[in-house]
Amino acid sequence: MRLRLVCSSNQNRSIEAHSLLKWQGLDAASYGTGAHVKLPGPPLREPNIYDFGNPYKFMLDDLRRKDLDLYKRNGILPILKRNSSIKDNHEEAAFGAQLAPDLCQEIEAVEYWEESVDNIVTDFENKHKCKLLYNISF
């Protein structure tokens, strides 16, 4: 079963549920539907607005630079820190990309990969402490 959670800015409930479901080993992902991410500003009527697609780390660094104490006190920095640890980031994506050739070589090393792919993937997941999503199509 694949679970997808959606909210406007992908900041609170959807990403918290994403974290909990993922921690329990379920296939979960979260998404936002808005065009922008709006986070409280110093006056609440003037939010910090970021284009969707900006990494959580970018928002975190920007708010730290603007007013570290304020955004720590109002809880925004801990939320962004949590979010950046849940969502795939550039470093994790780069690490995953480095694993791809290893998996391909392991699959190519067997004569009848179609019969062995499930065991190869399971062994690979155990070895690298990761979960792969894959589909075989003919």
Image (cartoon, helix red, strand yellow):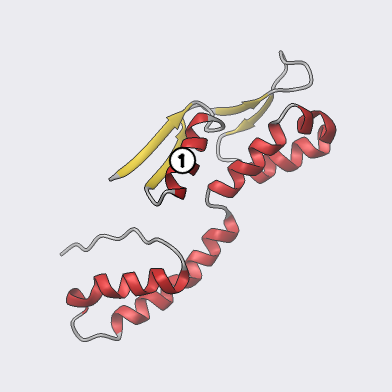
Residue tagged by mark 1? 18
Q: Amino acid at mark 1?
A: His
Q: Residue furthest top?
A: 45
Splitting the image into 4 quarters, where does residue 36 fall? Answer: top right
On-image quarter of the C terminus? bottom left
Q: Position of residue 89 (x, y in %)?
A: 57, 53
Between 118 and 37, the one nearer to me in the picture: 118
Q: Position of residue 104 (x, y in %)?
A: 35, 76
Quadrant in the rendering for residue 122: bottom left
- Give the residue furthest to the front: 24
The answer to whether residue 55 shows anywhere in this view is no
Relative to 48, say whether 17 is above or below.
below
Above-or-below relation of 119 to 88:
below
Q: Residue at x 58, y 56 (%)?
A: 90
Disc 1 element: helix
Where in the figure is residue 93, as x and y percent of width and height? Answer: 52, 59
Tell me where residue 116 appears, x and y as whole percent. 22, 77
Q: Quadrant of the N terminus?
A: top left
Q: Residues within 10 Å of mark 1 (few under 14, many from 20)?
A: many
Is 138 placed left or right of 102 in the picture? left
In the rendered structure, the answer to whether residue 104 lies left or right of residue 55 reads left
- Which residue is depicted at the point 77% across and 31% down? 71
Q: Nearer the viewer, residue 1 or 48?
A: 1
The residue depicted at 42 percent of the width and 78 percent of the height is 102
